[in-house]
Image (cartoon, rainbow, N blue to C red):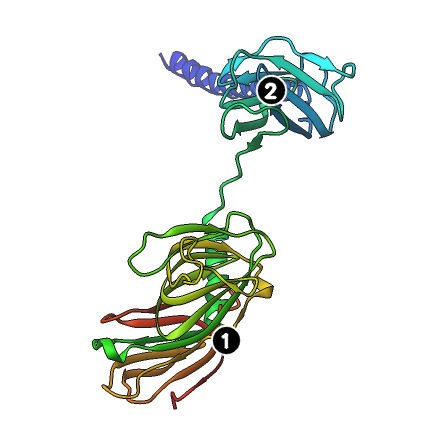
Amino acid sequence: MQEYVGGMKNARGVSEVISVVLLIGVVVVGVGIIAVTIYSQPTPAEIPEVSILVSNTSDGINLTHNGGDSLQEGSFYVLADGERLGDATLQNGAWPWSIGEVLRYDVEATPEEVQVVYTGAGGEVLLKSARFQGGAATGGPDIIPEPPEESELELGEIIKGFVDALESDSIYLYQKIESEGKVWKVTGFFNFTISDKDSYLHLSTKDKSPERVSFEPDEQISIQLSSDSKIRLFTIGSGNWHIFATDATVYSDGQSLKEPEDPQKPYSYIFGGRLHYEVDKFTSSVTITTPSDKNPHTELYINNTLIINGTCNQEINLTNIKPTKTTMMILDISKNDPCYFIGAAESITGHT
């Protein structure tokens, strides 16, 4: 029995050695299999860089090679609204498809979306995705790629830059006006040089329906305000986004605009419209004067610095008001309603 037990001890020692050897062998084989799997993979194919211009006719889609790598026949396919198109006709050229050459696909109806998918990279890669604007076209490029989405960081930087620029060059003036006879007085001219043919104003005289009056590029439009004028104005960029005014006269190239039915009667009301103008040619002689009594509640900031926050019995004058460097201006002078202005001016007095 003693010898048998001793034999068991020796057998257990041998089995432990064999287990270690087998484990090492399994690991070596596994590593070898992984290495073979990794290093036997083919080298990834290079994805071509190509610019594709998509256009349409009444019965077909044209893909124009607009620059970049050439594409071999069969290395890509085209989807129209998710349906794979058949063979294309290569016009004025031969494969491979190269810069300046046009591929023609026949379709029964103009699709909303066209996609070009590359298949020569060991998988499928989207080279082009675009949508038509406004349905079928008679020719020429009528399709654009969808723009990449802006990240929150980029949008945040844009907003911060706008706010910083506005705070460094702006006047904010607000007064709570409760008496009709104590509103702000505003006089002078706003002068616009029209930059787009889609510019127009809805004009009328008292008790008449407004008429749309359109303007042409390079036309000089002036809006004259009087001490009785009331106005709401919002402008930013190169567009006058909203305007409403009473007791105002509109001039085109120095001539006042008048009713067609009564050529002696100038328009005196502006009921909305849109003026696209050249920002660098905008001029203004408009002056704002606030009432000097009734002690209205007043808020005044100059370049984001608080000047007044409380009642004010002084007459404040802003001369030659204009948009800020960020191209924004808001002016609201109404009866029995708070008056306010956000913009810039050549000078401001009476606030100290």
Label 1 Cα crowd, 10 Å radius (few <14 / some 14-19 / many 20+): some
Residue position for label 2: 57
Q: Label 2 sits on what residue type? A: Thr
* Residue at 50% over, 75% down: 285
Report helix, strand or loop for mark 2: loop
Q: Is residue 31 left or right of residue 187?
A: right
Q: Which label sits on residue 293?
A: none
Q: Is residue 271 left or right of residue 287?
A: left
Residue 186 vs residue 81, the one in the foreground: 186
Q: Where does the image place residue 322, in percent across and percent down from the top left?
A: 49, 71
Q: Where does the image place residue 43, in percent across and percent down from the top left?
A: 69, 22
Pick the quarter of the image with the N terminus.
Answer: top left
* Residue at 56% over, 25% down: 137
Q: Which label sits on residue 285?
A: 1
Residue 242 vs residue 211, the one in the foreground: 211
Counting residues from the start of the chain, the first of labels 1 and 2 encountered is 2
Label 2 Cα crowd, 10 Å radius (few <14 / some 14-19 / many 20+): some
Pick the quarter of the image with the C terminus.
Answer: bottom left
Extreme residue toward the top, this view:
86
Q: Relative to 142, is 83 above or below? A: above
* Residue at 69% over, 29% down: 50
Q: Label 1 sits on what residue type? A: Ser
Q: Is residue 136 left or right of residue 259?
A: right
Regarding residue 73, the answer to whether it shows in the image is no
Regarding residue 189, the answer to whether it shows in the image is yes
Q: Where does the image place residue 314, in percent across and percent down from the top left?
A: 32, 89
Q: Contact, CB < 8 Å: mark 1 with mark 2?
A: no
Closest to the camera, between mark 1 and mark 2, is 1
Q: Quadrant of residue 193?
A: bottom right
Gap in Å between the C-alphas at discs 1 and 2? 52 Å
Q: Tell how many labels.
A: 2
Q: Quadrant of residue 332?
A: bottom left
